[in-house]
């Protein structure tokens, strides 16, 4: 899968893209990530990418021409790419969005800066996404979050197939608690069932813990989760405070 990032700070990406899961996926050639400097798509001597807003007001606004030129140049090479604009005004980027993006051949991710985008830039984007209800200084951190969340879902990126399936959110639930050695640490022990070797009991316990966690920490996710009748019965017990 191809990721093309349009940014005023291509250097921002150099270290994060060398690390861990994403770094390895790039080395293995499963994904390709390129950060393009938006200034390379300006035509004036000063390589201007921003200007003051019509109508007055503070701050600067990203100009439409370099952005349009850049997107068109990248799309000429990748006509099947989906253009994603990072903005706090976008739809919330969730695990579901990540899975959807992972099935695409290529993403062009646009990073904003300054006070905002010239409204006409929106005409060049297929999707507008926000990584949360807070304002960052630019779209670079959101772009990295998108690359990371999407890349780990691309087949072959994670070592073991299926290892992203137990991640939090993938079934619409938070992940169950995990433990590793030692069996006891400062009086805190590993739940007995995990030492039992009984896979059916372990699976059942994990499912219930995932439900319990989600119910306690993120009750807003429960109505959206993929639940069986047994799950629903367990949630009813949780509501009645029985477990
Ligand atoms: N740019 C600035 N803040 C952002 C956010 N929360 N999500 C996406 N892009 C942004």
Image: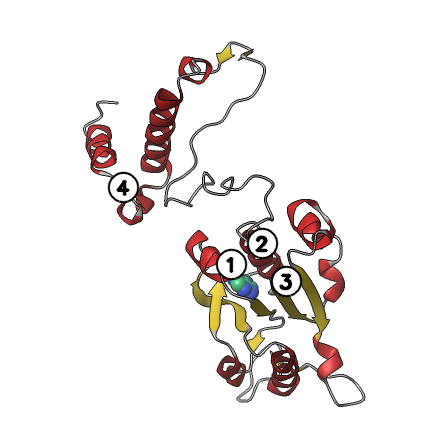
Residue contact at pointers 4 and 1, CB within 8 angstroms: no
Q: Residue furthest right?
A: 45
Image height check: is 118 above or below 234?
A: below
Viewer-side label of 3, 1: 1
Disc 1 crowd, CA 10 A, few/some/many (<14, 14-19, 20+): many
In the image, residue 93 sits, relative to residue 218, either above or below, namely below
Query: What residue would you read off at disc 1?
Result: 102
In the figure, residue 79 lies in which quadrant? Answer: bottom right
Quadrant assignment for ligand 1? bottom right
Decide: is 181 above or below 28: above
Q: Does label 4 or label 3 sit earlier along the sequence?
A: 3
At horizontal 65% and vertical 68% (from top left) the residue drawn is: 5
Q: Quickly name the residue at label 3.
A: 140
Q: Is residue 19 left or right of residue 225?
A: right
Q: Quadrant of the C terminus?
A: top left
Find out whether the residues at labels 3 and 1 contact each other: C-beta distance under 8 Å: no
**Image marks 2 and 3: residues in contact by CB distance under 8 Å:** no
Q: Residue at x 60, y 65 (%)?
A: 139
Q: Secondary structure at mark 3?
A: helix
Please tell me the numbered disc located at residue 227. Answer: 4
User: Residue 54 — which label?
Assistant: none
| Helix, strand or loop at mark 4 | loop
Q: Earlier in the sequence, mark 3 or mark 1?
A: 1
C-alpha gap between disc 1 and disc 2? 7 Å
Q: Secondary structure at mark 1?
A: helix
Q: Are marks 2 and 4 in contact (CB under 8 Å)?
A: no
Q: Which disc number belongs to residue 151? A: 2
Q: Quadrant of residue 160?
A: top right
For the question of whether residue 241 can be seen, the reply is: yes
**Answer yes or no: do the residues labelled 1 and 2 have beta carbons within 8 Å?**
yes
């Amino acid at each position: 899968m191809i990721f093309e990032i349009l940014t005023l700070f291509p250097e921002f990406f150099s270290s994060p893209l060398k690390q861990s899961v994403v770094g390895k996926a790039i080395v293995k050639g499963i994904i390709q990530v390129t950060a393009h400097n938006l200034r390379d798509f300006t035509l004036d001597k000063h390589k201007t990418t921003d200007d003051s807003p019509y109508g007055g007001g503070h701050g600067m606004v990203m100009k439409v021409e370099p952005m349009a030129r850049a997107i068109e140049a990248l799309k000429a090479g990748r006509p099947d790419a989906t253009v994603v604009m990072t903005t706090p005004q976008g739809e919330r980027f969730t695990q579901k969005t990540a899975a959807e993006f992972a099935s695409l051949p290529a993403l062009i991710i646009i990073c904003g800066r300054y006070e905002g985008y010239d409204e006409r830039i929106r005409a060049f984007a297929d999707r507008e996404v926000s990584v949360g209800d807070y304002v960052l200084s630019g779209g670079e951190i959101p772009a990295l979050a998108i690359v990371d969340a999407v890349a780990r879902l691309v087949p072959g990126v994670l070592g073991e197939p299926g290892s992203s399936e137990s991640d939090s959110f993938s079934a619409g639930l938070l992940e169950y608690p995990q433990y590793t050695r030692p069996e006891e640490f400062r009086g805190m022990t590993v739940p007995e069932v995990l030492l039992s070797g009984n896979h059916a009991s372990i699976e059942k316990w994990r499912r219930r813990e995932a439900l319990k966690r989600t119910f306690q920490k993120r009750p807003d996710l429960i109505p959206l989760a993929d639940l069986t009748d047994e799950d629903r019965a367990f949630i009813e017990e949780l509501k009645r405070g029985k477990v």
